[in-house]
Amino acid sequence: LVLPPSITLDQKPQNLFELCTCRRARQYHLQIKAFEDEESQATSTTHLFTINTIRQRPFFVDTNIHHSVKMKYQIPSTLLAVALSGSSTSAFINPSSFGISQQQRSSSLSMVLEKPKKEKKLSKLEILKTKSDHLTNPLKEQLVTEEISVNKDAMQILKYHGSYMQSNRELKGKKDFQFMLRLKQPAGELPADLYRLLDDLSATMGQGDLRATTRQCFQIHGILKGNLKTVISSIMNIGSSTVGACGDVSRNVMTTPAPFKTAEYKYANEWSKVFAQLFRPMTPAFSEIWLDGEKAASVEYWSKQVEEYDVDANMVKDNGRGIILPDSVEPLYGDRYLPRKFKIGVTVPGDNSIDIYTNDIGCVVVTNDKGELEGFNVMVGGGMGRTHNKESTFARAADHLGFVPKEDMMEVMKSILASQRDHGNRDVRANARMKYLVHTLGIDNFRTLVESYYGKKIQPWKEIEDFKYNDWMGWWEQGDGKLFYGLHVDNGRVKDDGDFRLKTCLRVLVDKFNLDMIISPTQSLIFRDIDPKDKAEIESIMAEHGLTPLEQVDPLARLAMACPALPLCGLAQTEAERRMPSYIDRVRSLLNGMNIPEEEILMRMTGCPNGCARPYMAELAFVGDGPNSYQIWLGGSPVLTRTAFPYIAKMKDENLEATVEPILAMFIQQRQEFEAFGDFCHRVGAEAIETYARNYVAGSVKA
């Protein structure tokens, strides 16, 4: 879609295509009158289409999402332009659904540009963002009150600063408000000095533990309001940040955690930091609130590593196609930021340790035969969040957008972000993620939308090695004479508990060997740059602190993930992190009892449907839908390249064995050679499994 530079709002466009591609015209209504051919009587039917704008919600037209409408249709401008200019979009827009006859559809169109009679009202959250003075108010005022909490508006703005207000839902009486703080750690990197600081802060101003998230960063829980400024300023002054860890901005950028010293892995690591810098919020609110307007004592450590990419200049580079906004503070985000959170992942061919298909944008390094970076394969539209009993929300695996040369990569990333910024659904937050925009338009039309900002065609996806899954646990050679070690952490909880003293062990290792860490996408930890002569001593220290050797960790536990859920998460409907260990034990008992102990099933659990532990990609998932109750999802890929399907709407905790045993029995009897559990479930489908389970007799099948 090419923006004709000659069109202004006081001119009549020459055709519908010109009008719809004019971004300035998207704030206005286009009245389209469909006339019969000149030879016939000029009777007409009038239809009012509303061009999508950043200030208006796009109307989604899709075979899977239907809305009840009469004579008004709100359609994304790209769909309207392409559909009515003769492009092949019949799968998305059927003219007959607009009440236009076949005769009228073959007629010419005349257009009248007019202002909307009534400006669309913004949602409360969008108004709050606009009035916040770029994420400053009312948070700044609320932080100095004597209350132990902040008000609802300040709580929303606080998310952009990396913190959520929580309370222990298991305590009765007056709420004990506290704050969870999430760090920004591009590529999951955790320098030794930063870990020492977090260890100290969690002990003196938190609840005594740390938690590794599924997006490769640490969280500190239990911080009191009066300590927030001390904690955040300490993190900023050591060269780290919490900015962008939460909120409607680009979140922590993930990459494969394996620190191999190969060209591909080096590019993935560097470019994840480039993207983190490119999409960082620029508002001075962070330094104004947490550092009293002063500069941090040290710049963010990852920014120093990508200085050669000239990210700041590329951020504000304006190609004249609407990417850069007239906002001197936030040239990419504006004062309303994005419709919803925005997630990016970067990996190399063959390595899907990061769940690449769950991101809004997934980037895969592409090199030539000499190992030189050519560019990236780019995928778009992944996301996990959904809402129970709301079919218009769903988990989705990303689509392949195409290949982008390295020299254009930042511009394409900006174009994708601008597409979501300007066309994402700002009315209904449940449908605000970019996955719904991609799903609604279809990947071809979404590509066209991105190209309208980019100004070039996106090249076809390049063939790459098939993805595999690896958690990178255990000992590995880095490729430079050093080793790295992946340490499994159950559900990411770094704590001391009796003889199990993980938190103390990490501090001993960091202090003794000055080791940097990487947080893995599976909530575990990787020590890198280990001198081989230190291997035996490191293993001895871990044993002394009660850590289980990797070879003794149940494979089910290594593959499993769970979100924190109760008692602190305000969205949790039931347990997750605290219940997952017992579910691993119970499924293990079933596998052993049915003589298939060698089976490794990727299981995940969340306390609500929002999908923080990415359950909808698992082979077997438990999604909380009420007290001690879970939805069961089956059929995700063991290499994490497709979503699962819902199997049971409500399974009570006590019915786990009765629910899972028939599925395992059918798997034993009907699996193909070397077929994984998730692939089997995907092949046979929910209906076949339901039929088998109805007739199954408990204990009747063993391998």
Image (cartoon, rainbow, N blue to C red):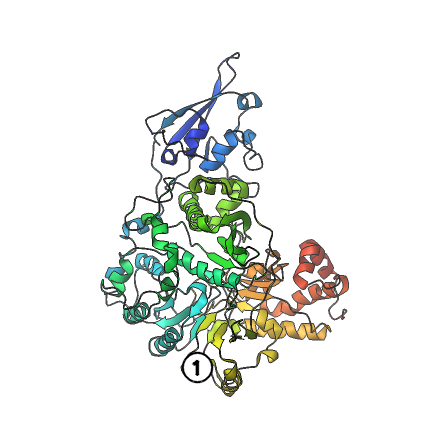
Q: Residue 507 at what x, y percent from top left?
A: 42, 81
Q: Which residue is mark 1?
A: 513
User: Is any part of residue 541 visible from this angle?
Assistant: yes
Callout 1 amino acid: Phe
> Which of these two is toward me, 95 or 540?
540
Q: What residue appears at the point 36 percent right and 51 percent down from the top-left corner? A: 315
Q: Is residue 357 above or below residue 39?
A: below
Q: What residue appears at the point 52 percent right and 43 percent down from the top-left corner? A: 440
Q: What residue appears at the point 68 percent right and 72 percent down from the top-left corner? A: 590
Q: Is residue 98 above or below residue 330?
A: above
User: Hey, which quadrant is residue 51 in on the image?
Assistant: top left
> As drawn, which residue projects farthest toward the front?
370
Q: What residue appears at the point 50 percent right and 86 percent down from the top-left corner? A: 537
User: Hey, which quadrant is residue 665 in on the image?
Assistant: bottom right
Answer few, some or many: residues within 10 Å of disc 1's Cα (few below 14, many 20 plus, some between 14 and 19).
Answer: some
Q: Is residue 595 above or below residue 425?
A: below
